[in-house]
Image (cartoon, rainbow, N blue to C red):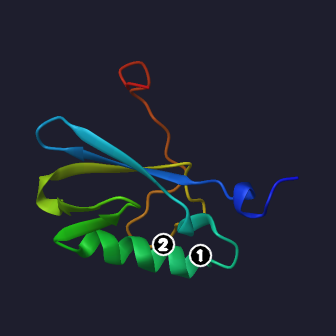
Amino acid sequence: MYSQESDITPTYITFHYLNGHSDSFNIHHLTEPGVTRQDIRQEIRRFLNEGWWVVKLPDETIFINASQVVKVELKPPIPSLEGEGVLSDAQWVTALNRPR
């Protein structure tokens, strides 16, 4: 029998840096039961507005200089993220060039 915790789909966040490197992490709290659309929207916007991003892992804490990041990816998508500054219903048009 699976626990309720195993039913939570983790969200993967990938930071792409100016130097071409990238780091990926999984985060669970964005998809936990009880988290509202407004909670997610506010948390992501607050996070992106910071100059330094802090990623707390079980064995270390990582500080990321936001000015060195050119792109942030979240997978799977967060459908509840909507409002000002969000392009909804977008589709890749450079799919053949996009690394998978």
Q: Which residue is found at the position 25% from the left and 67% from the top?
A: 53
Give the residue type at disc 2: Gly
Question: Would you identify the image quadrant in which residue 30 lies?
Answer: bottom right
Give the residue type at disc 1: Arg
Horizontally, residue 43 falls left or right of residue 29, namely left
Quote the CA–CA distance across marks 2 and 1: 11 Å
Circle on res. 83: 2
Q: Residues within 10 Å of mark 1 (few under 14, many from 20)?
A: some
Helix or strand or loop: what does disc 1 sit on? helix
Q: Which residue is mark 1?
A: 37
Horizontally, residue 12 falls left or right of residue 2, namely left
Q: Residue furthest right?
A: 1
Circle on res. 50: none
Question: Would you identify the image quadrant in which residue 3 lies?
Answer: bottom right
Q: Mark 2 or mark 1, which has the lower sequence index?
A: 1
Task: Residue 72 in the image: state x and y as whole percent.
Answer: 33, 51
Residue placed most toward the observer, 83 or 7:
7
Q: Which residue is found at the position 12% from the left and 53% from the top?
A: 68
Q: Residues within 10 Å of mark 2 (few under 14, many from 20)?
A: few
Q: Which residue is found at the position 42% from the left and 18% from the top?
A: 96
Q: Would you say the residues marked 2 and 1 are in contact, meaning their CB atoms lie under 8 Å apart?
A: no
